[in-house]
Image: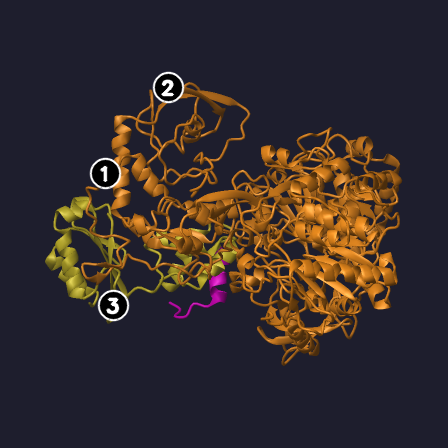
Chain colours: A orange, B yellow
Amino acid sequence: MKDFIIPDADYGTPASKSKEMVTLTVDGFPVTVPAGTSIMRAAKEAGISVPKLCATDSIDAFGSCRLCLVEIEGRAGTPASCTTPVAPGIVVHTQTGKLKTLRKGVMELYISDHPLDCLTCAANGDCELQDMAGAVGLRDVRYEAKETHFEARQNGEANPNWLPKDDSNPYFSYDPSKCIVCSRCVRACEEVQGTFALTIEGRGFDSRVSAGAIGDNFLSSDCVSCGACVQACPTATLSEKSLFEIGTPSHSVITTCAYCGVGCSFKAEMRGDELVRMVPYKNGKANRGHSCVKGRFAYGYASHKDRILNPMIRDKVSDPWKEVTWPEAMEFAAKRMGGIQAKYGKDSVGVITSSRCTNEETYLVQKLTRAVFGNNNTDTCARVCHSPTGYGLGQTFGTSAGTQDFDSVEETDVAVVIGANPAAGHPVFASRLKKRLRQGAKLIVIDPRRTEMVQSAHIKAEHHLALRPGTNVAVVTALAHVIVTEGLMDEEFIRTRCDWDEFQDYAEFVSDPRHSPESIAAYTGVPADELRKAARLYAGARNGSIYYGLGVTEHSQGSTTVIGIANLAMLTGNIGRPGVGVNPLRGQNNVQGSCDMGSFPHELPGYRHVKNDAVRDIFEKLWGVTISSEPGLRIPNMLDAAVEGTFKGLYCQGEDILQSDPDTHHVAAGLAAMECVIVHDLFLNETANYAHVFLPGSTFLEKDGTFTNAERRINRVRKVMAPKNGYADWEITQMLANAMEAGWTYTHPSQIMDEIAATTPSFANVSYELLETMGSVQWPCNEKSPEGTPLMHIDGFVRGKGKFIRTEYVATDEKTGPRFPLLLTTGRILSQYNVGAQTRRTANNVWHDQDVLEIHPHDAELRGIKEGDFVRLASRSGETTLKAEITDRVSPGVVYTTFHHPTTQANVVTTDFSDWATNCPEYKVTAVQVSPSNGPAEWQVEYDAQAEMARRILPAAE
Amino acid sequence: MPANPSEDRVREIIADHVALEGPLLPIFHALQAEYGHVPQLAVPVIAEVLNLGRAEVHGVMSFYHDFRKEPAGKHVVKICRAEACQSVGGDAISERAMKLLGVDWHGTTKNGNVTLEPVFCLGLCACAPAAMVDGKVVGRVDAAKLDRILAEVGA
């Protein structure tokens, strides 16, 4: 592993999980390691580095470079230490005369076919080949190579062995002339990432690393640009382009990725205050040294020219923006918000917290509305994604979060993935799951679409239940029907851990023949036999786990499905140990955290209801204010109230509700009716088109704080450069609060965390000091579990007894009919993130430069639609146009698109139906019609014009 | 020998072998038997059916010199390049063959009749220098024998 700065020790081969310990002697020192450990790793643990080139501890030993040879007393020859396991009592020598000669000879051969341009090489000082030449004492090379791979011309002629550099990937290059064919990249692509995009073509001297097949380059191959190959490459062959441009880094800071809910740890490698590259951090407990294209490479938005760096204000949204100083902006905002409250009452304003900002920032924003505005009008984008998770798991288990850590997947035997495509949305988790599947675990996918998880290189789901969008509850209940009626449940678990009476009630409910797979097949589209087999597989697993995503929650019955999933886990006893559990794959980096921090209108931090006097009392004493006991408005209610004229002011931090929330027309009308919309963001996002105050935000690279990922892991975000806009986001919220005379005096986010710990029992033991020593902790982290809780509900559910709740299927009101015969469902793609505000401003666009509509060949033919045609996508709410992609990944009757690009505005089409319990919008089901089209919809034309007008910025006054 | 490989036919050939344990090499053999080479359009199809990456399929295929990317000439002449044959004049035979055919290794004559290939040991060291013509081994190849062979294959 290339690791220039603060090298994380590379042990050469992966750790053995054996419990049996073995003692051996390496160079005279006794070493005790688990059985199955390689001699190379054992030596490293004793502090002795055996020279190596083809070994690195993220991948299995390969034994090809012949540099790591050792001698073992009583054994013949010089075995490779990477492929030779330890044995009790063996005496190993890593440095003998014979070994030195052999290694030098091997290095001479390597170097004879390697350009000696170290001084001008991007990997100078960061190259294992260079290090090994030094380590073996290479002083001269006796061989004069007649043929080489590195000289473009030989003897005045073009060298047929020389291959040009492949620069097709926007972020890294492949330079075959520097390649030593150690296969580390190929093995990393296979073992770590699980994409199998690389191979070694040819044999012998002709062996070359090849992306894809003949005619492919890195971009056209199956490569997903995760960076695992770059990470594994010991030379400059696979290197980040930024390294070529900037040079090697001088220091590094460990921080947390700001994209999805996996929450990967990265080392931000810096030169001065310039970011050279983001390198996945080996000791990161969520990602274990792996990364995806977003976290590793797509950080260019932080320095994109579109970023707004000065505060701006305007009287009316039809005016152009005027750049002002921070104090002017704060005064303007405070005056407006104060004025609105004076005129329309204190409940006429509110906030939306961001799931992309830190816990500390979110905490301050909800504090702003509760302590300064004096109401509970706070909500967050979790409303539109995982609010049903909070409700469903809270009701059944007693906590609003996933039950496991990501390491748990390494012990699962049957994984059920429902309504999620981790290969696109949570790529690093997908890699970890795929690795487990290749080891023999089975997979059940419940998804309308044939995602990459259903079948891709070396993995294949045992069962794919391709249900009709909107029928999750029926399918999940039918799974329970099979488990109960076939007697596959874990009765002992249910009797000891759950409420037996509630179980009996539930069992009676699900046993009803109307819940049988045969009864529901007609409207779910899932063959009964397949569903029965899936239920038996899950119920029969030693360790069965469920992972689910927004395909579960973003429905009118999202909460019911979450409850149904929890029921399945309780029925089968799959709770409370490694390898099992119920695991929501949370969408955004800190959506778990934003929920934990009291972003919901009815809950103070730690999911405690605002009606609870004792809880309010804690905060009232600390804040010195009275907190309203009335739950505030949810986002949709805010917008409704705005249209009605009772809600007039909004502070929206780091969220683009106009693009991300359903029924864009309604959101636009709500925003347009407000008198003060304060948008706090990196860019003039779509919501800012309706804003009066724009407060420029800071990126995750520019501030300190914490993010909480999908496994409840609190990870540190560390500042690596000064905020380009002048202030970290928590400072900006504090300025706004203080402009409204709040008198806050935080000088560092650690003080905010201390306040959170002091007020919120599940965070009681969390502090920056603890995070510094532990790296990260999973809440609950308090007196009972001072170092956090990787697995929840081990000996009992948080709520006491697990609660079975009936899950009656109620079809959504959004129904297909003659005018709208198709069902639209929405999702994500690997290279883009959410509304795309960040990823669209990076080179990730080479993979996905526009949203497309996936449509089944049958439906396309009926409508005369050909691949790449512009089509009109219309629902009862609105219409848009985009290009069609004809594919059988979707079933007939179902169409699919993503919502990454504002010009498509897929949410113009989605309706305002929502989850019965939490108002989470029903993004995943919209009845639509698709027809050929000539160009953009009327809405798109109007919208573009409005956006262009709204984004004007006056030139700064002379 | 069908001239234009079609994806449908390729799929049929793959389907005939997919039940075998380790079906990849038998599939390559079957395709080469049908077309005289492994058509490149088969690579992604094999990957899809066997659930492999297409890079892997390419990696395996390119490892074996005998699986051809494109059709060979009507006749294939292989000359042993291994040590034993080199020690008794194999080099001169190789050079003579290249000169007479006007091609380099792996080249095919302009008239499409002969493809010339190196091979590393035919197991015929006792009768070196050795060659192989359309799958049949020939021992003690000298200049005269080579000329005769090339004349027979219509160089």
The spot of residue A379 in percent (x, y) is 77, 54
Q: Are marks 3 and 2 in contact (CB under 8 Å)?
A: no
Report crowding for label 3: few under 14, some 14 to 19, many 20 or more residues within 10 A (C-alpha). some
Name the main secondary structure of what is drawn in magenta: helix
The structure residue drawn at horizontal position 74% and vertical position 68%, both measured from the top left corner, is A664
**Three-letter code, disc 3:** Asn
User: Quadrant of residue A892 in the image?
Assistant: bottom right
Report crowding for label 1: few under 14, some 14 to 19, many 20 or more residues within 10 A (C-alpha). few
Relative to A563, A947 lies left or right: left
What span is colored magenta in the figure?
B1-16
The spot of residue A296 in percent (x, y) is 52, 51
* Residue in front for this viewpoint, B62 or A606: A606
The spot of residue A38 in percent (x, y) is 43, 30
Res B9 visible: yes
The spot of residue A819 in percent (x, y) is 77, 75
Quarter the N terminus of chain B occupies: bottom left
Q: Is residue B10 magenta?
A: yes
Q: Which residue is mark 2?
A: A28
* Residue in front for this viewpoint, A468 or A94: A94
User: Quadrant of residue A865 in the image?
Assistant: bottom right
